[in-house]
Image: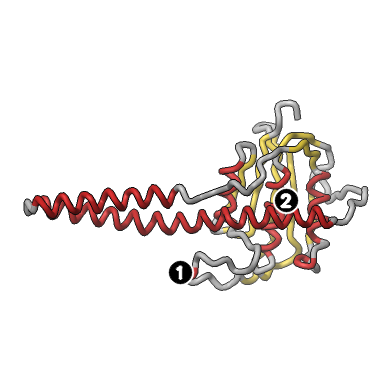
Amino acid sequence: MGDKRDTRQSKPMDVQEFSELMELVFAYSAAAHDFGFTHKMNNRFTALSMNASFLQKALQDKDYEKATAKSAQVSESIANLVKFSQNLLSVDQIPLETHQLEFPKMISDAVDKLLELPTFKGMILKRHIGADPIVTVANSGIIWIFLYAYLKNAKSYEIEGPILLSSELDKGNNQYIIKADVKRIVSAPDPVAENSALSFPSAGEIPLRYLARVIRSVSSKCEMIHQTDRPLTLELRINLSSNG
């Protein structure tokens, strides 16, 4: 499989397409932020709930009946707060409609248009995508946000060589796989301080670890694979339609 590009010239991104992309970025950013928020809330409230349980047991051993009853109420209240925080996530703003897509043309068109945006001017990308057309039904917004979020995150790293974008057909699992990677990370951005971990590094940047969870919530056809120890190595696995 060579480094091939579709020879047909894709049209520049028009105002409507740009508006739709920004709506996707906003919707996925909001959902990813919710995941980060609920994750931290759950950690804190779960620990508090465990401590309350230990206190309850200690009080039980001393037979402080009234205090034991009170600690039980505190534990129940905390459990309710944990449940509440788990229900804060909303993906209502993310469009769930599906389209008939042709790969790899759809990927090439999306990348061409993204690289024309001022945000990504000057970024170098090398493609190694399959040439055989594959048609399936999937949510095109997920492919757009996957590519956008990767490029946006990659901008904050110093890398060696171009960004590597590839795709392949996994016949055994009946999946189409889009991969994004780099040769080597020279330097990474400074880690976000713990006390400001709910803030995004820059406007429109979506933490990839949370994006993977958002995609899992809005689609049964797509799964994003993200390894925390390899921050710029990503896969988007798309289950192909039975008639695709």
Q: To which residue does mark 2 refer? A: 144
- In the rendered image, residue 64, in percent from the top left (x then y), is placed at 8, 53
Q: Amino acid at mark 1?
A: Glu
Of residue 180 and residue 186, the one placed in the foreground of this image is 180
Image point 83% across, 57% down: which residue?
15
- In the rendered image, residue 54, in percent from the top left (x then y), is placed at 20, 54
Q: CA distance from mark 1 to mark 2?
A: 30 Å
Colouring of the image? secondary structure
- In the rendered image, residue 240, in percent from the top left (x then y), is placed at 70, 33
Farthest left residue in view: 63
The image quadrant of residue 187 is: bottom right
Of residue 72 and residue 158, the one placed in the foreground of this image is 72
Q: Decide if residue 45 is on the left or right side of residue 91.
A: left
Checking the image for residue 13, the label placed there is none
- Regarding residue 118, the answer to whether it shows in the image is yes
Of residue 96 and residue 44, the one placed in the foreground of this image is 96
The image quadrant of residue 163 is: bottom right
What secondary structure is marked by label 2? helix
Image point 80% across, 63% down: which residue?
117
Image point 75% across, 52% down: which residue?
20
Q: To which residue does mark 1 refer? A: 194
The image quadrant of residue 239 is: top right
- In the rendered image, residue 154, in percent from the top left (x then y), is placed at 67, 64
Q: Earlier in the sequence, mark 1 or mark 2?
A: 2
Q: Amino acid at mark 2?
A: Trp
Of residue 140 and residue 178, the one placed in the foreground of this image is 140
Report the quarter where the N terminus lies.
Answer: top right
The relative height of residue 134 versus residue 125 in the rendered view (above or below) is above
